[in-house]
Image (cartoon, rainbow, N blue to C red):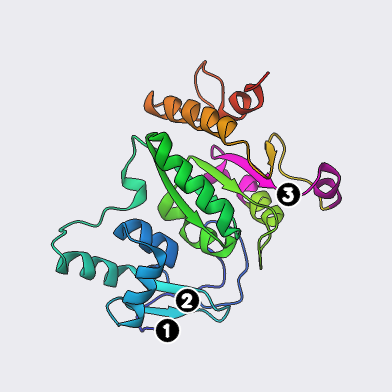
Amino acid sequence: MPLGHKKYSEVPNMGFRVNAEVPANDCGTFYAAKVLGIAVATVQGLVERGELEAWRTKGGHRRISMASLRAYIDKHGTKTLQTPAAASSKLRVLIVDDDEVTLEVIRSSMELWNLPIDCTVMNSAIDAMLDIPKIKPDLLISDLNIPVVDGFEFLRKLRSNPEYADMALLVITGLTHEQIEARGGVPENTPVISKPLDMKWLNGYLSAMAYLKALKWGPRSGSLPSPQDLLLGIGR
């Protein structure tokens, strides 16, 4: 691990214990790809060629130096580092799922819908936990069966943290209601939709969420319905 990076055993602001030494000023591959506007595979290629400084945690997760990201952008003519959280007028959506097919279906659909959405996708709850303070999503869409830290623990920890109390949650899963309840269920008032996803329904929900964000209403403020109430009401 490069010198000068802070070591800690908990993901910041989340309360998760991780079996690794994690640098403070770093990000995951998916976040780096989002910042640079390139594919994850391209980021991996930059790392392999030494154009981005990176290392792996003891758990095998690749982390990339934010300083090296800034240096790369400066070298290629960009003077400021534009992070996903910078686009405040757009609905910030974080999707966590290790199913690449599901991720690609959602990602390609969002491009066709042309909604004011800033979407970041990750295939690991660990990566999401490390980068969520930077992304600051308005909406988290998560699967439940994801490796290392599963979606159940991930969502419970998020919902118990006051800093993320206003973040809207949506579960996408292939599990049945009985299977979900047998594993402790999901946080109260968290909607669950089954795979394969109803993309028409998802389009309607995201359109409504984006509309609320454009009006600069918080997820649970004012007289407008909360995203959770809005979600539960769609299709009735």
Of the image marks 3 and 2, the number of the one nearer the N terminus: 2
Badge 1 marks a residue whose secondary structure is loop
Q: Is residue 184 above or below residue 54?
A: above
Occupied quadrant, residue 150:
bottom right
| Residue 228 magenta | no
Location of mark 1 (residue): 1
Q: How many residues crowd mark 1 within 10 Å: few (<14), some (14–19), many (20+)?
A: few
Work out whether residue 14 or residue 76 is closer to the camera in this orientation and state it: 76
Identify the amino acid type marked 2.
Answer: Lys
Badge 2 marks a residue whose secondary structure is loop
Where residue 91 appears, as percent x and y from the top left, is 42, 37
Q: Which residues are magenta?
A: 158-182
Badge 3 marks a residue whose secondary structure is loop
Identify the amino acid type marked 3.
Answer: Gly
**Quadrant position of the C terminus in the picture:** top right
Q: How many residues crowd mark 3 within 10 Å: few (<14), some (14–19), many (20+)?
A: some
